[in-house]
Image (cartoon, coloured by chain):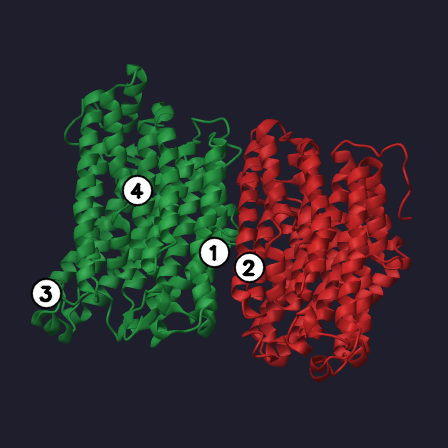
Chain colours: A red, B green
Amino acid sequence: MTFPLLTLLGLVPLVGALVTFALKGAAAKYAGIAFSLVTLAMGVWAFALSASGTGFDERYTWIRAIGAHWSLGSDTLSMTMVLLTVIVVPIVLLAEWTIGDDPESGRGSTGAFFALALMLESFALYCFMATDTLLFYLFFEATLIPMYFLIGRWGGPKRGQAALKFLLYSLAGGLVMLFSVVGVGAEAAKTGQASFLVSDLAAANIDQGTWGRLLFLGFFIAFAIKAPMVPVHTWLPDTAEQASPGSSTLLVGILDKIGTFGMLRFCLAIFPDSSKWATPVILVLAVVSVIYGALMAIGSRDLLRLVSYTSISHFGIMVLGIFAFTSTSIQGSIFYMLNHGFSTAALFLVIGFLVKRRGSAQISAFGGVQKTAPVLAGLFLVAGLSALSLPGTSSFISEYMVLAGSWQRQPIFTAIAVLGMVLSALYILLAYQRTMTGPVTEQTETHVSVDLNLRERAVLVPLVALLLVFGFYPKPLVTPLEQPAKEAMSHVDMTDPETVVKGGN
Amino acid sequence: MLTLLETNLDWGALAPLIVVFVGACLGVVVEGVLRRSIRDEAQLIIAGLTLVLAFGFTVQLWRGREFGVEAGGSVSVDGPALFTWGALIIFTILALLLASERKLNQGQTDFVPMAASVPGSPLEARATALRLEHTEVYPLVLFATFGMMLFAASNDLITMFVALEIFSLPLYLLCGLARRRRLLSQEAALKYFLLGSLSSAFFLYGAALVYGYTGSFELNRVDAMIGSAGASSLLLAAGMGLVGVGLLFKVGVVPFHSWTPDVYMGSPTPITAFMAIATKMAAVAALMRVFYVGFGSMEWDWQPLFAVLAVLTMLVGSVIALTQSDIKRLFAYSAIAHAGFLLVAVAGAVTPTSSSAFGALTGSVGSIQFYLAAYGLATMGAFALVTMVRKAGGESTSLASWSGIGRRHPVFGALMVLFLLSFAGIPLTGGFIGKLLVFLAAWAGGYGWLVLVAVLMSLVAAFFYLRVIVVMFFREPNEHSEGVTVEKPSWMTWTVIVVAAVGTLVLGLWSGPLAELAIRASAFLGS
């Protein structure tokens, strides 16, 4: 038996969660961060192996009676998502180092927060690595448990309701997907051999007729809620407003990626025809998400709501890239998932530091922060610029790839989506102007008098560095993504349009 | 011709039944012979040994695959029967452990000191002062278990009726034995008795009609006669319907569910747990046997009916559960909803003979067996936890009094969450795999739409389980929760909780072995 790197990759944070849960006080914090760093090292190693072309998939039979497998894949799509997860989690832990000390914002200890975050990391990692539909579903649903408690126990005064709303939306999506999981399993069994492996399901020719489309919709609706796309997005702003910034980062930065990841991995592979059948509607929804999210962000009075609306807008671009069906746009889309994770994390966390000082997330509560806390303001600006995809940040590369690729097949939708880019400049810069520039208000003077401390800088600097480094030198991350993009194209049996623009490298 | 006296019984094949019956009888003898002071220990030991021995015989039979229709065609010892026997025995052991818990209640069990005393009377007070006890609980439970085991294995309708009565009568009694809130308990017993008798009458009438049409009580002969007689008649349809009513009553299917909430709430909690699992298990096994074996050739007639009942049951159970303010009543409605999920697979009717899809999946019987095992474990655990929440010695079951209890007692809270998640069918628990198997069976049987409905109902169901979690963790303590504590139980209740929790996780994560066992034990003899 070969070394089960993938299984261990998920197991380490899970064990870490249990250990952290059992410990108390500072010991729990250090244990939590240590486990997340070990996971980081393993994750980076796994990504490097995968990018160099080494395959190390794992497959064991789990429930033979229904053809379920413990099956983990090591392709670069999975490993890119793994990379995102393992990087974001330790940063979030560091950012929320003192969350348990504040009696106002929550009731649980920091150790409990760390334990839940590690549990979430483990489930999310398995989710990204699973190549068995049932296994994926298992962890897809399981992530809700730690996330629910993370939102419900730490955050604003209405966090209980926010957690409930999040859970109900997610459960609704999850159960609709359960219908489809049962369906594909039972349909595949009609071939004589039950199996939930994505490869077997793709070969079983399930995507036929009305039932095929219904099953596709089950998957797609679940992923659209997760991503989130308009019109099933309303849970996100409410949740992000009440949750702690760390939880929001985990939610938007990592968990929501399962939505777009799932579209690529499951919808396109198992339901190629239905995916093409639904493309016009999906593209409309994607573009609506781009524009609507941007407009709502401009209109937001709350910084946390603002960031969540920008995410809705950005998820629209990712979905556009996937369903435009060109290899460049899909490649860009996957790269965007990674960058978006970093840039939202940076934004949520820097705003979190700001909110913590001021005790409010209202834009009107700030003014002139750049004079009292220049480092904070500067990092806010850089994070914001990466969110609006300024050239030089890695988000720009990915967004450009999506738009350039999509243009070849869907010029109209792409043209509308480009508007979203313009709007994004507006919401970021307006927010910056209103909170950071101008005369120092009295409130800012008293509350935001201290600039970022060393720990807070240590949280933000790596994120900003990642965004900038890969903005100038994206090759190590982009090149490995050619393979999954090519695979996705072959699933749906499409080739790039004639006028191929070579993008990315 | 049937000979009236069947002399060549295969004692070995019937050993588990006989052992439990003898154990129960011994319990009765002990009541008359031993001193009061040592009766309780003696009863516990006898019941424990009996059940362990019966379990051993059951395993022995399964190992040797000694299947056969015994006792002149009236008892069918086959895969489903043995699986149900084994599970019933295990759950009975757990229920008895809960029933003998004394530490939670100042050294006394949850049963009334003297059932014959009028509530509030001087006699009752004297009985309490003397610390009298009803150790008859043990033989009663054993008799009920014996009846259920026979019920699940009955191969003819008369034996099935006798078994039905054997397990029902002790249960009626047990329901009325609660130490506290005795009027409620006695009301529950009376209601259960009246409605139960009515349903038994339906069953018997149905059996008579079926006999009238087919000339036999034996299930495989009934099936053969239906097959050869061709066109179905009103007589047969009425007979089948009435037999069905009797069985569905015990399963707790809408519209025959109305006894469930009151009985669950009024009964002593260990008995509620016992009924919730064991009755359901035996009744579903009998239901499948009657319909898959006896009326197997008429599946086109009853499948749609079961599908409709499944929808109704899930709907009523889940929606009414939303409004409940008492935890035991909530579990009662949840039990109704679960009966609906079980019917989803019953309606699918994927059996080795009926469907080509069988073989690639677990089939209806195997799925339901797995589901019941997972459901049973979660139920046992949840009710065991309910017995621990006390206010001034008595159980505190109103939901409002549970406010914030999970934060004050994190271990208690985490365990309850585990069982609730299993009920709700959230992954990593046995409940999820059970639900998945049941849905797969229904889909393979051609009931894809029913799966869709069931999935939507699962969402409603998840919501009310979630309400309990919200109350436990996110609600501030209030005037209702004052003085409510989580008592520390003795090893007996802890054993139940640990077994239930570990079992729930094992079934959720390492589900293969039990799923394999359930599928191998899913062929009815004679079908």
Up-down relation of residue A177 to residue A497 (above or below): below
Up-down relation of residue B172 to residue B213 (above or below): below
Q: Chain of mark 1?
A: B
Dot 1 or dot 3: first in sequence order is 3
Residue shown at 61% from the left, 32% from the top: A213
Which part of the image, by quadrant, shows the N terminus of chain B?
A: top left
Answer few, some or many: residues within 10 Å of disc 1's Cα (few below 14, many 20 plus, some between 14 and 19).
many
The amino acid type found where label 1 is placed reads Leu
Name the side, left or right, on which A428 lies relative to B152.
right
Q: Which residue carries the number 2 mark?
A: A145
Q: Which residue carries the number 3 mark?
A: B117
The amino acid type found where label 2 is placed reads Ile
Residue shown at 63% from the left, 80% from the top: A26
In front: A192, or B242?
A: B242
Residue A203 drawn at (x, y percent): 67, 32
Q: What is the distance, in whole Å, between disc 2 and disc 4 at their CAs?
A: 34 Å
Q: Chain of mark 2?
A: A
Circles 1 and 4 in contact, beta carbons < 8 Å: no
Element assignment for label 1:
helix
The amino acid type found where label 3 is placed reads Ser
Residue shown at 86% from the left, 63% from the top: A468
Dot 3 or dot 4: first in sequence order is 3
Discs 1 and 2 lie in a common subunit: no
Element assignment for label 4:
helix
Residue A118 drawn at (x, y percent): 64, 65
